[in-house]
Amino acid sequence: MAISRRADSLDLGVPLDREGAHRSLGGHLRRWLPIGIGILMAVAMIVLAAAAPLIAPLSPSAQYSDAVLKGPGAVERHLLGTDEFGRDILSRIMYGARIALFVGFAAQRRNLDDTATTAEFSANSFGTILSSVSAEV
């Protein structure tokens, strides 16, 4: 048997009056600023990946023998530098984001398909059990 009692406003942690229900600007920023920054970063990555062929400064697979292992800004055309084969790092990041997003979305799609299949299997199994139990009764 459960024991019940009346909950006071202090127990609930929610003010009962309308004046205390409003949060300050600092409270809103503390809660929503990290969420907003995360959403902004995700949208920026998606836009960057989608527009990679249009905004990438160079081909991600082109090799420049005159710019092997150059640091950021060392050569004018390579903003983030080059790797050991002279390939532009910024272009490789942009095109790599496309592949990473595709793999992530494909994995989520596969997960949803597997979940639906599992739910259908469970529902069919439960229906079979119910029909066999009802047939015995």
Image: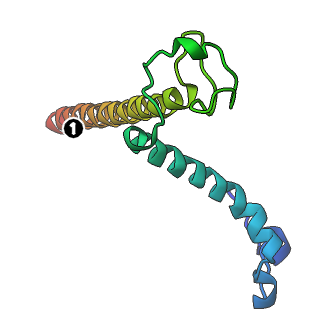
Tell me the quadrant of the picture where the N terminus can be found: bottom right
Q: Position of residue 75 (x, y in %)?
A: 64, 27
| Residue at figure coordinates x 43%, y 35% from the top left | 101
Farthest-out residue, right: 10
Q: Is residue 106 left or right of residue 60?
A: left
Q: Position of residue 20 (x, y in %)?
A: 81, 84
| Residue at figure coordinates x 66%, y 54% from the top left | 37
Q: Quadrant of residue 77?
A: top right
Q: Position of residue 44 (x, y in %)?
A: 53, 49
Callout 1 secondary element: helix
Tell me the quadrant of the picture where the C terminus can be found: top left
Farthest-out residue, left: 135
Colour setup of the view: rainbow
On the image, numbered disc 1 is attached to which residue?
127
Q: Is residue 33 left or right of residue 112?
A: right
Residue 9 seen anywhere in this rendered image of the structure: yes
Residue kind at label 1, given as amino acid type: Gly
| Residue at figure coordinates x 42%, y 34% from the top left | 98
Tell how many labels: 1
Q: Is residue 71 above or below residue 128?
A: above
Q: Is residue 127 above or below residue 9?
A: above
Relative to the observer, which residue lies in front, 20 or 24?
A: 24
Query: Badge 1 local density, few (<14 within 10 Å), some, or many (20+)?
Result: few
Q: Position of residue 82 (x, y in %)?
A: 60, 20
